[in-house]
Amino acid sequence: MHHVAAAELDQRIDVVRRFNRLYTRRIGVLEDGYLHSEFSLAEVRVLYELAQRDRATATELARELDLDPGYLSRILNGFTRRGLLDRTKSERDGRETWLRLSQAGRDVLEPLDKGAREQIGTLLAGLSDPAQAQLVAALSKIETLLGDPPGPAEQTAVVLRNHRAGDMGWVVQRHGVLYAQEYGFDESFEALVAGIVAKFIEDEDPRRERCWIAERGGEPLGCVFLVTASKKVGKLRLFLVEPSARGLGIGTRLVDELLRFARAAGYRKIKLWTQSNLLAARRVYARAGFVKVDAQPHHSFGQDLVAETWELRL
């Protein structure tokens, strides 16, 4: 695991705090009432969460919003006094109370929700289309890093596309960074990757060779390459999935797409070269039907490794 030096950690903390100050100022969180209303930001979040559900318990709300139960109880009692909340006893447990917004509560929330959308719309309108796309991609990345694991809806939002300008730089950079962080590979591995992508761009035969990029919201999440070894043999190369996107089935989708293309292109066999310690990649290969046919110890990229050759007959 990579340990961050204290000075570097302090700098990162300062960057996050600076962003927090900027964003809270831009959306008016520091004002007494959210969007000049009588409600605090926390109260509006509770109203919004209740509006997304047919009913909920206080325990569920506290867990979902990460609010102190006592603080949430005071908010809910205030809503009840204002007629914004309906309470009914739970059929499953008499000690539980179901909560749902009353019609008055929905009437209160509607202009607040509309105002929030207009506020963000105004913020985005001040940016060019490319800048908006960059902002949305950056926020999606923040959500991925700090939020809950992505669900099925986010998995389906991942698309596979052919490479375009700038992708090869990303492929080299991410291989260099991730293999250094996760396996301790030195810069010679990044140089190897750079040579592979340079040859691919210079010599690519689009009928038989291809690069696939997995992408969500404009952000690359993974890649794989198919290159020609001989008339009937293709090579799978440079297979990578970002750590934040692992567990979504992206690796399997990339390899399956490569194999479909390889069959249509007339290949009879696909080979690949990997290392014995790349466990996640090896699991994807095995599930796809690849079989290990050779293993040789070697010293490369600053590490003692065992190189493996895998093959799949199509």
Image (cartoon, rainbow, N blue to C red):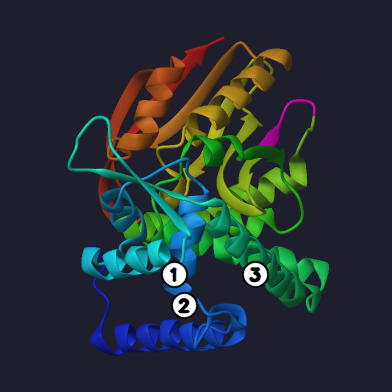
In whole angstroms, how far apart are the C-alphas of marks 1 and 3?
A: 14 Å
Q: Position of residue 180 (x, y in %)?
A: 36, 60
Residue at disc 2, secondary structure: loop
Label whose residue precedes the other's in the sequence (1 or 3) = 1
Relative placement, left or right, of 249 versus 77 is right
Residue 140 image-quadrant placement: bottom right
Q: Residues within 10 Å of mark 2 (few under 14, many from 20)?
A: some
The answer to whether any part of residue 176 appears in the image is: no
- In the image, residue 45 sits, relative to residue 303, either above or below, namely below
Q: Nearer the viewer, mark 1 or mark 3?
A: 1
From the image, tell me which residue sits under label 2.
Answer: 40
From the image, tell me which residue sits under label 1.
Answer: 43
Relative placement, left or right, of 195 versus 91 is right
Q: Nearer the viewer, mark 2 or mark 3?
A: 2
Q: Residues within 10 Å of mark 3 (few under 14, many from 20)?
A: some
Q: Which residues are magenta?
A: 207-211
At horizontal 60% and vertical 40% (from top left) the residue drawn is: 158
Q: Position of residue 149 (x, y in %)?
A: 39, 47
Q: Disc 1 vs disc 2: Cβ atoms closer than 8 Å?
A: yes
The answer to whether any part of residue 135 appears in the image is: yes
Residue 133 image-quadrant placement: bottom right
At horizontal 69% and vertical 66% (from top left) the residue drawn is: 117
* In the image, residue 80 lies in the stretch drawn in magenta: no
From the image, tell me which residue sits under label 3.
Answer: 116
Q: Disc 1 vs disc 3: Cβ atoms closer than 8 Å?
A: no
